[in-house]
């Protein structure tokens, strides 16, 4: 019985995630819709990261903001994502010492 529940739950979460992958490739959107859809990952990433920037050190939110600004600057310079993350981590670490 428990195996059937596990399989049913996995199908219930997998089907809504897999079906759009097959449908979206066959649809043709207008250019402005494609531009808007391409911007969604960046907007979601910003919505996930920004609250964390403000709560790195609850007493001192400026430390997270400085780390975020350093990350933006390093990304603007075209550095690899790993280097951007390491640079912001090092900045926050140095400010919390």
Image: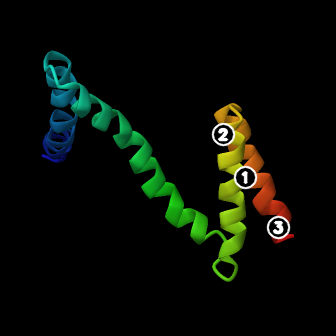
How far apart in space, not on screen, are marks 1 and 2 (Cα)? Answer: 8 Å
What is the x, y in percent for residue 68?
Answer: 65, 57
Q: In this rendered view, identify the residue nearer to me: 97 or 6.
A: 97
In percent of the image, x 35 and y 33: which residue is there? 38
Q: How many marks?
A: 3
Tell me the tag on residue 75: 2
Q: Alpha-carbon neighbours of circle 3 within 10 Å: few (<14), some, or many (≥20)?
A: some
Question: Which quadrant is home to the C terminus?
Answer: bottom right
- Is 89 left or right of 27, judged from the image as shown? right
In percent of the image, x 66 and y 39: which residue is there? 76
Q: Which residue is mark 1?
A: 70
Asked which quadrant contains residue 92, the reply is bottom right
Q: Alpha-carbon neighbours of circle 2 within 10 Å: few (<14), some, or many (≥20)?
A: some
Q: Are marks 1 and 2 in contact (CB under 8 Å)?
A: no
Q: Are marks 2 and 3 in contact (CB under 8 Å)?
A: no
Asked which quadrant contains residue 36, the reply is top left
Q: Secondary structure at mark 1?
A: helix
């Amino acid at each position: 019985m428990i195996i059937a529940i596990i399989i049913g739950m996995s199908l219930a979460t997998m089907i809504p995630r897999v079906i759009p992958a097959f449908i979206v490739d066959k649809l043709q959107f207008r250019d402005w819709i494609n531009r808007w859809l391409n911007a969604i990952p960046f907007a979601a990433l910003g919505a996930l990261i920004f609250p964390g920037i403000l709560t790195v050190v609850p007493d001192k939110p400026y430390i997270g903001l400085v780390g975020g600004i350093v990350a933006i600057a390093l990304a603007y310079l075209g550095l690899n994502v790993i280097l951007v993350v390491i640079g912001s981590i090092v900045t926050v670490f140095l400010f919390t010492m």
